[in-house]
Structures are given as structure tokens and as C-alpha cells.
Amino acid sequence: WYFYSKQQDETPAWKKVNYQNVYKDIADLLEDENYDDGSYGPVFVRLAWHASGTYDKKTRTGGSAGATIRHAPESEHGANAGLNVARRRLEPLKQKYRNISYGDLYTLAGVVGVQELGGPTVQWRPGRSDKQADACTPDGRLPDAAQGADHVRDIFYRMGFDDREIAALVGAHALGRCHTYRSGFDGPWNASPTVFTNFFYTELLENTWVPKKWDGPKQFVDKPTGAFMMLPADMAFKTDPRFRTYIELYARDQDTFFNDFSAAFAKLLELGVKFPEDAPTYRFKPLD
Ligand code: ZEM
């Protein structure tokens, strides 16, 4: 049996996956006219972010490496409400590509979401290995939308980001919307929630934002139409002078936003991950 076991395939699982094919298959899952604004892209981006944004640089815990977001209690944390929808949508690909880890699948889905909705290309590496429920992070590591700049800084500094990177990352709020049945908040940030743009910044600066009159949690709506929204935490980027510098920069310079977002998002998806030394870096071409 000794000689027999020596002949077993020793190729690590992550090397047996064709990630270009996975990219294509995730892209094929994006469109669905009956879901939200017609695309799963925004919720895939949010899944990748919440899978990664639990990282704590001091204790070196959390992050996307273990994909603990799929286990209770982390899956049940209030901040993760609704992300089961994204995980369920991706599950057939985990079955199809048995050797892909959930951590790689969820982060790659975030890359696909950004790129296929017209955003910048984002570098990505495979090789995360999944962990069990005992590695779940405690509740409270993701930002609370009801709070302001101090809280936002506490949360993102803990991950290892600076003000410029934080301001770039929050530009993802060009995508998607808030759902009352998930977060309690309501509405999209702009008129094209399935296109990756710098509109988070332009809308934030150009509109007059007033508190929404409703029974729900405090949020803001644009004054003329009431069609678009901002979270209290979003508003902090306009009122905080150091954040505001970058908001103004990204509002007037979409290329700089795309470059900064691409770098910060790639960094986010790699927080706390120990990649195999021979893991290649991919920069996937967006599909036509
Ligand atoms: Zn979000 N985000 N986020 N975010 N986010 C929501 C939706 C989306 C905050 C937040 O509380 C919320 C980042 C940062 C921060 C996306 C991406 C990224 C929602 C609405 C809330 C409440 C959820 C719902 O009801 O479905 C706060 C406080 C943040 C920090 C200040 C970062 C960083 C992101 C990625 C890089 C995306 C794409 C959505 C839209 C999801 C969807 O389903 O449409």
C-alpha cells in the first residue's frame, strides 16, 4: 500500500480548476430579468466584499480565505442578510468545479461583477482554502450604515486600508440597491445600478440630500425626485473633509477612480490569504 499511495495524484485542488472557464460561467449567471434590476452582479460584489471585509490585521483572523461567510453564525449576521441569494446562485458552479474553494468562487464572483458591469479589470489569484464554522468571525466586523466617519475609519483601518482606499471602495455603491427586507434601507444610489460608474461620487456631491420621511431607519433621499438614496455612512464621505478630497477627485476623474478602485478591491479580496507560492495572478478579459 505504501507504493500505491505514492502514486496518488498530488496536484493541489486549486491547480485543477480552469478559472477562465469559471469566470465565463459566473458571467453567464449575472443576467436575470426577474431579479432586482436585472443582474446578480451587485449582490456578487457585495458577497465578495462581506466575505473579505471581516479581516482583522492585528489578530490576522477573518478575510476571504476560509469562506466562513457560508457558515452559521456568520451567515446569519445582520450585515449578511440577503447574501444567501448570491451564494445559492453560485452553488451549481461549486458542484461543477469540485476543486474550486468557496473562498475563490466568492471572490472571483466579485471580480466578474465589477468587470462585466463595465468596471475596471481587477487582478485576482486562486488558492484560498476553506475553513469550518469554528473559524467564523464575531459579529460587528462589517460597517454599520447608521454611523459616521469615525466608525467607518475604525472598521477599515482594522483591515489595513487608508482614507484614499476607503473612499475608492465605497464607490461600489454605484451598483445595486438597498432592500428593506435585507438591511432595512431602501432604494438605489443612482439611475444605472447595473453599470459600474463613478456616479456614487457625482450624485453625492451634486444633489441636495434630505432625510427620508418614513418609519424606517434614518437615510437620505435626493431632494427633487426622492428616487435615489444615501446611507448615513455614505453622507460621512461628503461631510468629512479628508474623505471629501477623494470624493471630489473621483467625481471629476473617472480614470483615477477606476485605477484606485481596482487596486483597493484586489487588496480587499486578498486580505489574510496565504497564497501558494506558485499561484498565478490573473487579469481576466471582460467578455464581449
Ligand atoms: Zn455596501 N451596502 N456598504 N459596500 N454594498 C449595501 C449594499 C451594497 C455599507 C452598507 O451598510 C451597505 C461597501 C461599503 C459599505 C455594496 C458594495 C460595497 C447596503 C444595502 C448597505 C446597508 C444592502 C441591502 O439592503 O441589500 C457600508 C456602511 C459601507 C461602508 C462605509 C464596499 C466597500 C463595497 C464593495 C467594494 C454593493 C455592491 C451593494 C448592493 C448590493 C445589492 O444587492 O444590490
Image (tube, helix red, strand yellow):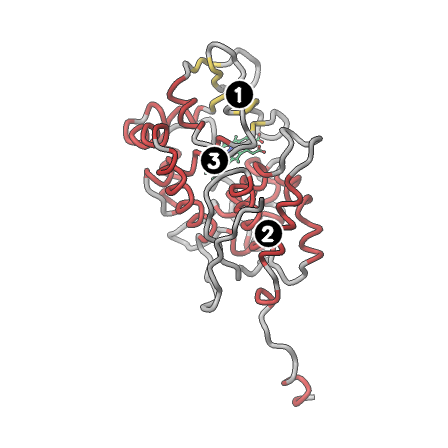
Residue 42, given in percent of the width and then of the height, sits at: 56, 36
Q: What residue is shown with label 1?
A: 217
Q: What residue is shown with label 2?
A: 23
* Secondary structure under the numbered disc 2 in the rendered image: helix
Q: Is mark 3 within 8 Å of ligand 1?
A: yes
User: Between 150 and 114, which is closer to the camera in this rendering?
Assistant: 114
The local crowd at label 2, few if under 14, some if 14 to 19, many if 20 or more residues have their Cα within 10 Å, is some
Q: What residue is shown with label 3?
A: 172
Q: Is mark 2 within 8 Å of ligand 1?
A: no
Q: Please, which residue is most extreme toward the front here?
A: 288
Dot 2 amino acid type:
Tyr
Mark 2 or mark 1, whichever is nearer to me: 2
Residue 284, given in percent of the width and then of the height, sits at: 52, 52
Dot 3 amino acid type:
Ala
Seen at 63% across and 85% down, the residue is 6
User: Between 88 and 190, which is closer to the camera in this rendering?
Assistant: 190
